Amino acid sequence: MVDESRVHSARRYNYWLGGKDNYAVDRESGDQIAAVFPTIRTTVVENRGFLRRAVTHLATEAGIRQFLDIGTGLPTADNTHEVAQRIAPDSRVVYVDNDPMVLVHARALLTSTPEGRTAYLEADLRDPQKILADPALREVLDLGQPVALMLIAVLHFIESTEEAKRIVGVLLDALPSGSYLVLSNGTSDFADDETRARFAGLASRGRLDAYPRTAAEVSSFAEGLEALEPGLVVVSDWRAGDEPEPRPAPAEVAVYGIVARKP
Ligand SMILES: C[S@@+](CC[C@H](N)C(=O)[O-])C[C@H]1O[C@@H](n2cnc3c(N)ncnc32)[C@H](O)[C@@H]1O
């Protein structure tokens, strides 16, 4: 059921991206965060740019044809299957989100090319075994072939880094060698004292539902994998050579990204 009285991160993200699929409660939360962190719209646009560049690279250079995109968000411009299928029409994408609002809009994620396939599962990242065992996932993805596991701006909703690591481990264990992890996670590594104090204020009033991580913590999710160049960087700097200059400062973006290959 869609609960209009509770903040949903998918709807709040949609608000920051300029979308219309959000309610007053999401806009209020979005504005509170924007008051503390005025460049949040730069953050979300840059995070989407990272998704687009990472999928483009994997489809073009790495020959990846299967994507498992968990924490999909509300459909917007350049969803994973659109980016991948523009390059390789036979790409297969399984989307997963736990927000009923995303399910309501999932039709827009199911506009696959005839050569490819897409599917949408309503499921929770906290139960990775259930996601992996879902017959709809098995119908679309062949787990004997490489898969790009996409965890973009979703792991920071899981408070415990140990628990998040366990989840990433379970998912990666199910994928063969040659698979990839594409991950982004918020950070306060670049924040000044004033911004930190304002975030702490929001958190103490129960108004913050995302947990920033340090570079070391985010890197630990890719332990045992081979990070592609340039390694762990702010998302706006990941292979952004063709993006308009000047690039935003790391403190304005405050999200780390990494793409890494399972050996
Ligand atoms: C900030 S949005 C990111 C959307 C998209 N990945 C992107 O980067 O543009 C986070 C999404 O993760 C979803 N999400 C949060 N916690 C989740 C969980 N435990 N299981 C599945 N999805 C979750 C939210 O509903 C939301 O749609």
Image: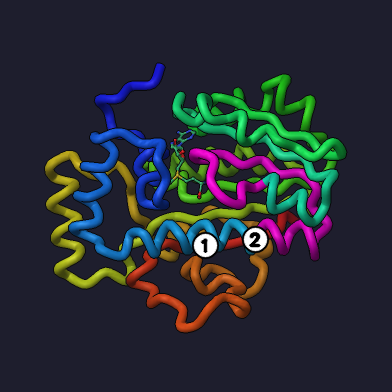
Q: Is residue 248 above or below residue 78?
A: below
Q: Is the residue marked by circle 1 packed among few (<14), some (14-19), or many (20+) residues within 10 Å?
A: many
x then y, percent, for residue 6: 27, 28
Q: Which residue is pictured at 62% across the width and 78% down the height?
A: 242
The magenta stretch is 55-80
Q: In this view, does 192 lie above or below 46?
A: below
List the residue tagged with mark 2. Answer: 54
Label 1 element class: strand
Amino acid type at image mark 1: Gly
Q: Is residue 88 above or below residue 120?
A: below
**Looking at the image, is mark 2 or mark 1 earlier in the sequence?**
2
Image quarter for residue 55? bottom right
Q: Which residue is pictured at 33% across the width and 59% down the height?
A: 40
x then y, percent, for residue 244: 53, 78
Q: Verify CB contact (< 8 Å) between mark 2 and mark 1.
A: yes
Label 2 element class: helix
Marks 2 and 1 sit apart, C-alpha to C-alpha, by 10 Å
x then y, percent, for residue 220: 51, 57
Residue at the front extreme?
20
Amino acid type at image mark 2: Ala
Q: Which residue is pictured at 53% across the width and 30% down the height?
A: 105
Residue 161, visible in the rendered structure: no
x then y, percent, for residue 13: 39, 46
Q: Is the residue marked by circle 2 packed among few (<14), some (14-19), or many (20+) residues within 10 Å?
A: many
Q: Which residue is pictured at 56% across the width and 62% down the height?
A: 50
Along the horizontal axis of the image, is 58 left or right of 14? right
Mark 1: C-beta under 8 Å from nearest atom of ligand 1: no
Along the horizontal axis of the image, is 93 left or right of 52? right
Residue at the bottom extreme?
246
Residue 197, visible in the rendered structure: yes
List the residue tagged with mark 1. Answer: 257
